[in-house]
Amino acid sequence: MYQPSEYSPTSASVDLTALAQNVAHVRRLAPRADVLAVVKANAYGHGAIEISRALQKLAVRRFGVATPDEGIALRQAGIQDTILVMGATVPAQFAELVAHRLTPVLYRADLIPTFAAHARTPPTPYPVHIKVETGMGRLGVSPNDLLELLARSELRGSLRLEGLMTHLADADNRDAGQTEEQLTRFQQALHHVQERGLAIPLIHVANSAGIIKYPTSIHSLVRPGIMLYGYHTLSNDTQAPELRPILTWKTTVAHVHTISPGSSVSYNRTFIASRQTRVAVLPVGYADGYNRLLSNRGQVLIGGRRVPVIGRVCMDMTMVDVTDVPGVQVGEEAILIGQQRSERITASDLAAWQQTVPYEILCAIGPRVPRRYLPLDSPAGAASQSS
């Protein structure tokens, strides 16, 4: 297993007290719902094991992952609470799901008997969730087929139907039409289920945008993801809670030099100096997750000021123009995501420069970047390290 050096000049710090504040926001918005914390994709790049351990201290007892491998990693790290595998699974993975007590989301009728055949060993019926397709166009059982599926004998034998869910496709859009249609379809399906006298303990629809914007999407369980980490993708005119980004990504200046007008920086000479230019070289590049699309487009904080990325972002290095920031020296801190003095750059800023979403920015921060964790209620600086 790759372990980055503790002396790496590039690192990410994760503020677990800010995480606690974001969890508190979730609970204020959904006071009667249980929380399933989505920690897939390495907790959106923040470190799934450390984030899950911190969430346990905050009385979160349910976790959501995308793949069995992600769930197994949490089990091996000692996370014994409920882990829901929300992504696509195949029969070859079912034995591992059962062996590690991972709860699957089943999304096709044929998966029920196949999974039931693997779940006969446990002494009590094995919990499963069923996903209903209401408009995401991805995984899920059609509402028209739901009642027939729920009547299967396996769900009264070796399997126990613990949850019913759907996923909102467009809840962060200013136009509420698609989301309202999805909520209506799911509510109709749920009504038919309840008419048949079927009691399902966990009903869940609300993702982060749903929690913030659609109270009617909140049932017995909510699935916050990006909002745990301090972000949302709702339009600017939406009243959102005061979420706190929990990750700071920083590096240090490795080299400073001056180039003359007409000189170029980096591959393919995409930056040509129009003046005498002081260039700072940062030891971070696209292999670390700092995307090549930020070439001649991104910004970094040095000396409390925004400085532009110049030339192509390289695999391992990025150059910035520090001509207008007096006295920049080797070893000086550079902030890629985070705050420095009164200036701030967020993952949403990087997303805008790359024409993507903050999810991708955070997930892309690679394993070469060590994560250092500021413990719950700790002063800044007292950090534990983990890769």
Image: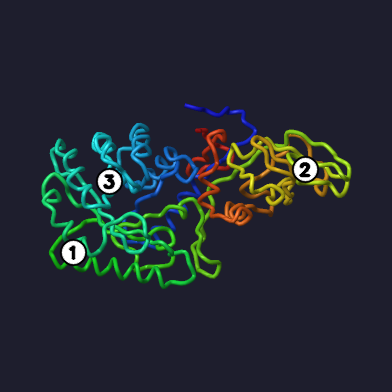
Residue pointed to by mark 2: 269
Which of pointers 1 and 3 lies earlier in the amino acid sequence?
Answer: 3
**Looking at the picture, which amino acid does disc 3 mark?**
Pro
Task: Tell me which corner region of the image, top left, top right, bottom left or bottom right, holds residue 202.
Answer: bottom left
Question: Which residue position holds label 1?
Answer: 193
Query: How far apart are the two marked residues, 2 and 1, measured between alpha carbons?
Result: 63 Å
| Residues at discs 2 and 1 in contact (Cβ within 8 Å) | no
Q: From mark 2 to mark 3, how far is it between C-alphas? A: 51 Å
- For numbered disc 2, what is the local secondary structure? helix
Where is residue 323 shown, x and y percent of the image?
82, 46
Q: State which mark lies toward you, 2 or 1.
A: 2
Front residue of 305 and 68:
68
Circle 2 crowding by C-alpha within 10 Å: few under 14, some 14–19, many from 20:
few
Q: Is mark 3 on a helix, strand or loop?
A: strand
Q: Which of 244 and 140 is in front in this view?
A: 140
Amino acid carrying mark 1 in the image: Val
**Residue at 56% in and 55% down:** 356
Q: What residue type is labelled 2?
A: Arg
Q: Nearer the viewer, mark 2 or mark 3?
A: 2
Marks counted in the figure total 3
The residue positioned 17% from the left and 43% from the top of the image is 116
- In the image, which disc is placed on residue 104? 3
Looking at the rendered structure, the secondary structure element under dot 1 is helix
Residue farthest toward the front in the current orientation of the protein: 268
Q: Picture coordinates of residue 368 (x, y %)?
A: 56, 33
Q: Mark 1 and mark 3: span between their CA atoms?
A: 20 Å
- The colour mode here is rainbow
